[in-house]
Amino acid sequence: MFPDITADLKADAPQLRGRLIANQPLAEFTWFRVGGPAQALFSPEDEADLAYFLKQCPQDVPVTAIGVGSNLIVRDGGVPGVVIRLGRGFNAIAIEEGHRIRAGAAAPDVQVAKAAAKAGVAGLAFLRGVPGSIGGALRMNAGAYGRETKDILIEARGVDRLGRAHLYPNAEMGFRYRHCGVPEDVIFTQALFQGSPGDPAAIEAEMDAITQARESTQPVKSRTGGSTFKNPPGQKAWRLIDAAGCRGLTRGGAQVSDLHCNFLINLGDATAADIEMLGEEVRKRVKAHSGTLLDWEIKRIGLA
């Protein structure tokens, strides 16, 4: 348990409208279902509430943003400071003229893909294969099946640590493979995407094919965090992991998936340390076998 800082935070921001909770367990918010608490969890009502909180929050209080927890390990010691999790005030999806879609940062990628398909907007079907929400897709240039967020983004909105709102055109996002160059303290709140005219039935068929491909090749029904490591240039992480003999490797309650060995799984009683240390063991064995050091794709936060 961390010291309760919520009373002081509320005193600093008396007009706060969102929920502020002390020592909120975070395991329930991650797909791995592991990890300790947030010292304070803040769920803002809307962008204005988020900006107000960040402006009033003392600068010596750490602030960490999380999404739906699909690509995240929260360490067992929990996360000091404030964890911000965007909710209902940030999940709207709207179809706009010119085959554009505006989506809040908390909107699940799959729901954006479905809304686009229903409206006959092509080009966003790949989001069906991206576990997570739009905020995370922006932060890590998420992609699947040959397309990435950078290919469809017009602009993104975000709020920085001082509570200032910014608009980032695609060219200013600094996109690279599984990376964007926007400062880490910026919390994305919204995105505008560009699609193209399409037939709803054809888009639905494309999404069905993506769903079938994922279910046949990935442990999507397990407690997992998606792809664990980035693909090195010109290589596939799973092939390197497999060649190093790591398929099925276990540590405590964590396992390298037998189905897709770039996925780690919580078999039921894993700790965050089990999962992270299993990942480090995989990195060690791959480095010894191939000379390639894998980079984590999964974000890891908090205290061990």
Image (spheres, helix red, strand yellow):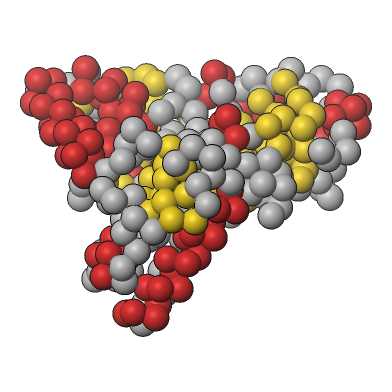
Position of residue 268 relative to residue 89, above or below, is below
In the figure, 93 relative to 194: above or below?
above
Whether residue 107 sits left or right of residue 208 in the image: it is right
Q: Position of residue 215 (x, y in %)?
A: 23, 36
Q: Quadrant of the C terminus?
A: bottom right
Task: Classify residue 79 as left or right of residue 255.
Answer: right
Of 123 and 236, which appears nearest the observer?
236
Residue plotted at (27% across, 43% down): 218
On the picture, is 51 further left or further right than 279?
right
Q: Who's the residue at 31% across and 47% down the image?
A: 143
Taking the image as shown, residue 181 lies to the left or right of residue 203, namely: right
Q: Residue at x 88, y 38 (%)?
A: 3
Residue at screen point 50% across, 47% down: 253
Return the x and y of residue 149 as percentages of the image width and height: 34, 45
Observer-nearest of 222 and 132: 222
Residue 272 position in % (x across, y down): 58, 48
Res. 148 in view: no
Q: Quadrant of the N terminus?
A: top right
